[in-house]
Amino acid sequence: MQVQEQRLGDRPRTALEVAGLTRAQGGRLIATGGCFDLLHAGHVSLLRRARALGDALVVCVNSDDSVRRLKGPARPIVDVRDRVEVLRALGCVDAVLVFDEDTPAAAIERLRPDVWVKGGDYEGETLPESEVLGRLGAEIVVLSTLPGRSTTNLIREIQ
């Protein structure tokens, strides 16, 4: 089963619509989250591999205020409208949900994914969202990252 239609009428599907449709069709909903500032090959690789784990992928994206609190006043480099637009353009992404909190726990609670994907840089760490994922019975999958691919490294190289 695949959630292939990206439009409901003339508008893109919301993350909650994709989640509901995926569940209604008996599919497996995958979700992941992050800042996705300066989208690069490491992000795309992670998103493609995450999408391959199920029938629909929802990407939870930190708002600009959330990124500033987590990464400092110079971030994000790209504002949330542009980050969302670029993510929505990827064929592996079915929907995007912006959250303003420091963790995606509330977004996860609303989406109720079957699988939550994190990049390999979180290997062995307790995730702030672990409690809500456990309560929902969601599987946590940590996917390896591409060596040397990170937004922080890109920014450092540019400077």
Image (cartoon, rainbow, N blue to C red):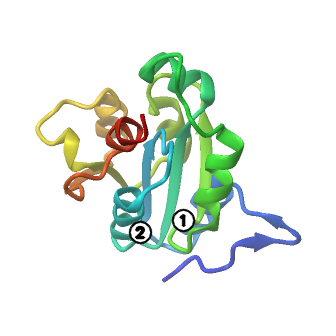
State how far apart marks 1 and 2 are (Cα): 7 Å
> Do the CB atoms of the residues marked 1 and 2 lie less than 8 Å apart?
yes
Q: In the figure, is residue 64 to the left or right of 30?
A: right
Q: Position of residue 122 (x, y in %)?
A: 21, 39
Q: Quadrant of residue 47?
A: bottom left
Q: Looking at the image, is mark 1 or mark 2 earlier in the sequence?
A: 2
Foreground: 85 or 5?
A: 85
Q: Residue at x 24, y 59 (%)?
A: 146
57 sits to left or right of 80: left
Residue lying farthest left? 124
Amino acid identity at mark 2: Arg
Question: Dot 2: what SS?
Answer: helix
Q: Which mark is residue 84?
A: none
| Total labels drawn | 2
Front one among 116 and 1: 116
Instruction: Report the disc number at residue 93.
Output: 1
Q: Residues within 10 Å of mark 2 (few under 14, many from 20)?
A: many
User: Which structural element holds mark 1?
Assistant: loop
- Amino acid at circle 1: Val
Q: From the image, tell me which residue sits under label 2.
A: 51
Q: Which residue does the image show at 35% across and 41% down from the upper left?
A: 157
Tell me residue 63's x, y (percent): 60, 31
Can you tell which quarter of the image residue 24 is in? bottom right
View extreme (right): residue: 10
Residue ID at (29%, 33%): 130
Q: Can residue 16 be seen in this snapshot?
A: no
